[in-house]
Image: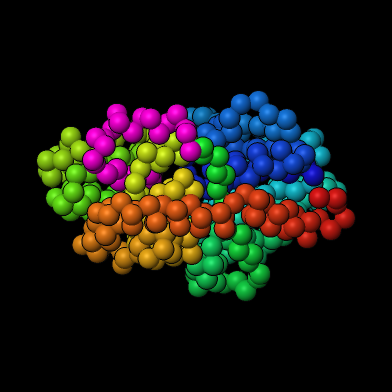
């Protein structure tokens, strides 16, 4: 099949999932055309069956706000038409689903039928999408997509709650590609960040308010008061200055390492003992799954879809949003005893296999088949 994938090319989970999905489909022989405004960070090097179409963003002086959606739509029309695509798969509804709808109608007027699938990822529903400034458009696009998927049962329910739709939403969870070897060279880097007797806690995010990175620091401080430990923070975003200031206020600057943005976070996770994800809301928590895949247990909030990934008492623990005392208590109960820690590590890794590429990819392929019954998939 020839599939156009539209996504945000940045470090966010939706871009990562869309890119890895495209790469996996390309490896199976599908022709994949990524359509977005810059090269997706996880795209990697030259590979068979992968094409990238950059949406040029106009800077005409009249435009205070660039008309990205219009330019994206035109690019989609162009790529569908001249690359003879069979299907468009858009990740994150805003504005990708409405651009896909518009492109499909333009193409229809030219005698070309192109179905589009919308994958809802989280904030396009739970935070931004339900805002009245987006809601009518998102509702319309959900109803007009040829198929809709959500990355968790929780996100599916939120969609029904916040939008006027009763159409079928397929839950296709996010996946992780686990390639870690026991003797990975990155594990040797552990000694550069922590002494052998210190435990390493880790957090990866885009440092937006919704991630509650300040809670990560509060939890770490409580843990640090009880056992020797280091905290590695990966990522960057609007809250970073506040978090740096908080670390200074706690006097923990020597124990907290800010790595900034890292392209392949799995290598950092390999040296961690515990992952912290105290988010206000999280449709799935791909970062937690990526930690579990390299054998790192997770102490998290119980919001949104996280409980579908992190199993309380088995792969880590869940606490109410903001309950940093409980999170610290749970973290210590895992970290204080090496036998307990090992058991959590093993179970976390085992659990991540439920979300392996091999299990999830066929779900997308059968949906493509359902949308295009006459096409060989
Ligand atoms: O978490 C973010 O702010 C980024 C966002 C995105 O669109 O990239 O993440 C969302 O999609 C991820 C992939 O499906 C999910 O794992 C995240 O849980 C979800 N984020 C939120 O719901 C806050």
Q: Residue 169: x percent and y percent?
A: 63, 66
For the point 70% across and 33% down, which residue is it? 50
**Which sits in the foreground, 176 or 7?**
176
| Position of residue 213 in the picture relative to residue 247 (left or right) | right
**Which sits in the foreground, 208 or 142?**
208
Residue 114 visible (yes or no): yes
Residue 131 visible (yes or no): no
Q: Residue 20: x percent and y percent?
A: 60, 42
Query: Quarter-wise, where is residue 250 in the image?
Result: top left
Q: Is residue 30 above or below residue 162?
A: above
Q: Quadrant of the N terminus?
A: top right
Q: Residue 82: x percent and y percent?
A: 80, 35
Query: Can residue 254 be found in the magenta stretch?
Result: no
For the point 66% across and 69% down, which residue is it? 168
**Which sits in the foreground, 65 or 274?**
274
**Which sits in the foreground, 298 or 65?**
298
For the point 71% across and 54% down, which residue is it? 362
Query: Quarter-wise, where is residue 119 in the image?
Result: bottom right
Q: Which residues are magenta?
A: 182-208
For the point 34% across and 46% down, which residue is it? 273
Q: Residue furthest right?
A: 374
| Position of residue 216 in the picture relative to residue 184 (left or right) | left
């Amino acid at each position: 099949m020839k599939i156009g994938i539209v996504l945000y090319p940045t470090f966010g989970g939706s871009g990562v999932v869309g890119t890895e999905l495209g790469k996996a489909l390309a490896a199976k022989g599908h022709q994949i055309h990524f359509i977005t405004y810059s090269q997706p960070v996880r795209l990697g090097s030259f590979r068979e069956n992968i094409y990238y179409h950059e949406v040029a963003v106009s800077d005409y002086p009249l435009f205070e706000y660039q008309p990205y959606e219009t330019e994206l739509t035109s690019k989609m029309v162009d790529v569908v038409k001249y690359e003879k695509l069979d299907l468009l798969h858009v990740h994150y509804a805003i504005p990708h689903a409405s651009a896909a709808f518009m492109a499909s109608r333009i193409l229809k007027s030219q005698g070309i039928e192109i179905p589009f699938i919308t994958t809802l990822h989280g904030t396009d529903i739970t935070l931004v999408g339900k805002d009245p400034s987006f809601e009518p458009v998102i509702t319309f696009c959900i109803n007009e997509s040829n198929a809709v998927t959500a990355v968790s049962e929780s996100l599916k329910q939120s969609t029904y709650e916040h939008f006027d739709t009763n159409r079928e939403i397929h839950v296709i969870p996010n996946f992780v590609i686990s390639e870690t070897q026991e003797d990975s060279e990155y594990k040797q880097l552990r000694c550069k960040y922590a002494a052998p007797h210190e435990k390493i806690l880790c957090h990866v995010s885009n440092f937006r308010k919704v991630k509650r990175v300040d809670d990560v620091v509060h939890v770490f401080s409580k843990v640090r008061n009880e056992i020797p430990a280091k905290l590695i923070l990966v990522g960057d975003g609007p809250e970073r200055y506040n978090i740096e200031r908080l670390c200074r206020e706690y006097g923990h600057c020597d124990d907290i390492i800010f790595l900034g943005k890292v392209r392949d976070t799995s290598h950092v996770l390999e040296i961690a003992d515990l992952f912290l994800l105290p988010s206000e809301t999280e449709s799935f928590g791909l970062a937690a799954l990526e930690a579990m895949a390299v054998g790192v247990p997770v102490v998290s909030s119980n919001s949104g879809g996280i409980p579908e990934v992190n199993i309380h008492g088995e792969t880590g623990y869940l606490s109410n949003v903001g309950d940093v005392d409980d999170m610290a208590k749970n973290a210590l109960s895992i970290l204080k005893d090496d036998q307990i820690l090992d058991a959590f590590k093993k179970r976390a890794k085992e659990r991540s296999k439920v979300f392996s590429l091999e299990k999830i990819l066929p779900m997308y392929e059968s949906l493509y088949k359902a949308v295009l019954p006459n096409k060989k998939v």
